[in-house]
Image (cartoon, grey):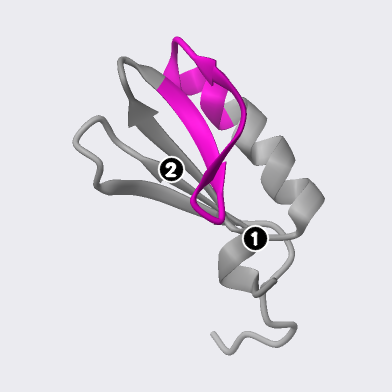
Amino acid sequence: MTAQEKNVQTVPTGGNWVNKVGGSQVGPAFPTQEAAVAEGRVLAMQNHSEHVIHGTDGQIRDKQSYGNDPREIRG
């Protein structure tokens, strides 16, 4: 499984919010984005991957990385 396939996507679906990994839903559907984001954060930390949070329009709203950052970042 590539790093991209391990990424957690928090997306709206059918009036609820779900987390997807590799295109498949992981865990339950949540009635609020806040609850789904909290669970998605835990999944991303466990996977050492990126957590991508989408808005109600499906556009990416935020990204957080949990483990795939380069060690040396030039500033």
Q: Residue furthest right?
A: 46
The answer to if 21 sits in the magenta stretch is yes
* Identity of the residue drawn at 54% across and 45% down: 24
What is the quadrant of the N terminus in the image?
bottom right
- Residue 10 is situated, as x and y percent measured from the top left of the image, at 47, 38
Mark 1 burial class by Cα count in 10 Å: few <14, some 14-19, many 20+: some
Residue beneath disc 1 = 6
Relative depth, front residue between 59 and 64 = 59
Disc marking residue 74: none
Note whether 24 is above or below 5 in the view shown.
above
Residue 13 falls left or right of residue 36: left
Residue 44: within the magenta? no
**Residue range of the region highlighted in magenta in the rendering:** 17-37
For this view, does 41 lie left or right of residue 10? right
Q: Which x, y percent locates residue 13?
A: 34, 27
Q: Position of residue 14 (x, y in %)?
A: 31, 19
Secondary structure of residue under mark 1: helix
For numbered disc 2, what is the local secondary structure?
Answer: strand
Q: Residue at x 49, y 29 (%)?
A: 18
Q: What residue is at 44 percent from the left and 14 percent from the top?
A: 32
